[in-house]
């Protein structure tokens, strides 16, 4: 289960990468990534920003099946040392 | 009014495809050259764009030579259409290799042949990129990234003709955010054109023939986030329905951690390779394409 710190940090990164006008405070763990305005091109920006912000290296294709904010946070935590 | 124009274009397309099915390839080629010459005379704006671009790129400043290259470029595009319509016949059988000569760097050939390895393949509006995609699909499945045409009536039949079981298309901005990543994960080829004019806030101004051109960062970003091999190639026409597929060594630019400079370095290298190819055969570049519309 993704911790709050990861979810908050992830939401900040997404807010920076997305061009969509969204009520970011309402974005929760079960929000789908697609609903946040990411498409096949802009997701590349997000992945790059995530790799930089979280300092993790991973194969971007591993994210091909990730659909929600929670799944993404879980994925990132699995790649990091435990933080919470 | 727009709807009427779309329907007229659709009717013209259907008639053109029907006509091409009735005549020999040699006759279709002759017809294509005539139509291109007529279009070159008629379409003043595109003719001017082509000539201006040739001068701006420094290909030639001699007006006779500029006119010759621009006219040949129009003919080249018409032939490209004819050849693309023919590809399903020419490359469907066992004899397709008779039409192709390959000049592919061994490292690039190795990634193309290695099963399970996704490849980012970049080209430009140079040579016949439709044939290139068709040939590459003999190595592994190809997914071409395309811009949807504004006319929905012509978009569908054209897309249908381009695709077959190992060659499919995907829009540049697919609502499925994981689309490009899935293609590479499946070990397929993701094919993009680097010289399309880019709109939006993500565009990068990168020199093309020494003149800043608005460029999509996507090939560079894809390479940076997936680390998949990034190759540049093109397919030159060497005779009637004969081609040479050329691809150099995969592009390797070590990431510095600075996204903007990494993207710029990769795009500059892609543009450099495209320029090099165009300088050798400028007649096979689509000069009428408005590459530098902001300068």
Image (spheres, grey):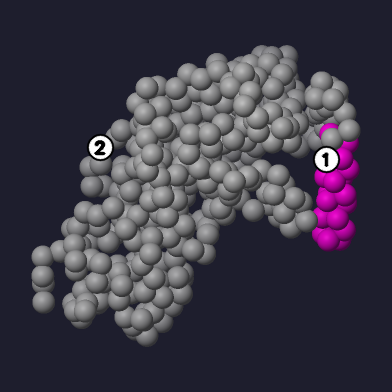
Image: B102 above or below B14: above
Residue sitting at x 45%, y 31%: B232
Q: Position of residue B139 (x, y in %)?
A: 48, 34
Q: Which residue does the numbered mark 2 point to in the structure image?
A: B254
Do the residues at pointers 1 and 2 share their chain? yes
Q: Position of residue B290 (x, y in %)?
A: 63, 39
Q: Which mark is residue B131?
A: none
Mark 1 or 2, closer to the camera = 1
Q: In the rendered image, which quarter is residue B253 located in? A: top left
Task: Please give left or right for residue B224 compared with residue B233 in the image.
Answer: left
Residue B33 drawn at (x, y percent): 81, 24
Residue range in magenta is B1-20
In the figure, is residue A59 to the left or right of B36? left
Chain ID at mark 1: B
Secondary structure of the residue carrying numbered label 1: helix
From the viewer's perspective, tell me whether residue B243 is left or right of residue A2.
Answer: right
The alpha-carbon separation of the residues under discs 1 and 2 comes to 47 Å
Specify the subunit that label 2 lies on.
Answer: B
Q: Which mark is residue B17?
A: 1
Is B102 in front, or is B258?
A: B102
Give the structural element (helix, strand or loop) at label 2: loop
Residue found at x 32% / y 58%: A62
């Amino acid at each position: 289960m993704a911790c709050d710190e990861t979810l908050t940090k992830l939401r900040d990164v997404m807010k920076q990468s997305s061009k969509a006008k969204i009520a970011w405070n309402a974005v929760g763990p079960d929000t789908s990534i697609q609903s946040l305005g990411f498409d096949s091109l802009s997701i590349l920006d997000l992945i790059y920003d995530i790799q930089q912000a979280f300092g993790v290296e991973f194969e971007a294709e591993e994210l091909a099946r990730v659909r929600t904010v929670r799944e993404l946070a879980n994925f990132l935590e699995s790649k990091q040392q435990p933080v919470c | 009014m727009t709807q009427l124009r779309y329907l007229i274009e659709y009717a013209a397309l259907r008639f053109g495809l029907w006509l091409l099915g009735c005549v020999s390839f040699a006759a279709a080629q002759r017809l294509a050259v005539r139509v291109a010459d007529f279009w070159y005379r008629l379409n003043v704006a595109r003719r001017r764009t082509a000539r201006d671009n040739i001068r701006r790129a420094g290909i030639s400043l001699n007006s006779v030579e500029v006119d010759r290259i621009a006219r040949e470029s129009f003919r080249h595009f018409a032939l490209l259409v004819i050849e693309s319509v023919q590809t399903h016949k020419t490359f469907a059988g066992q004899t397709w290799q008779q039409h192709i000569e390959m000049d592919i760097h061994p490292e690039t050939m190795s990634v193309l042949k290695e099963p399970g390895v996704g490849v980012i393949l970049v080209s430009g509006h140079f040579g016949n990129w439709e044939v290139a995609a068709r040939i590459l699909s003999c190595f592994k499945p190809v997914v071409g990234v395309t811009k949807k045409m504004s006319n929905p009536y012509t978009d569908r039949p054209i897309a249908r003709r381009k695709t077959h079981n190992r060659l499919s298309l995907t829009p540049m901005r697919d609502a499925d955010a994981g689309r490009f990543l899935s293609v590479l994960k499946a070990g397929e080829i993701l094919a993009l054109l680097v010289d399309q004019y880019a709109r939006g806030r993500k565009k990068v101004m990168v020199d093309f023939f020494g003149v800043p051109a608005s460029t999509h960062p996507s090939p560079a970003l894809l390479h940076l986030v997936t680390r998949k091999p990034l190759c540049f190639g093109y397919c030159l026409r060497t005779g009637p329905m004969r081609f040479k597929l050329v691809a150099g060594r995969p592009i390797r630019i070590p990431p510095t951690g600075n996204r903007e400079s990494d993207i710029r370095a990769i795009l500059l290298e892609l543009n450099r390779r495209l320029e090099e190819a165009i300088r050798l055969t400028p007649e096979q570049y689509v000069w009428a394409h408005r590459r530098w519309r902001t300068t």
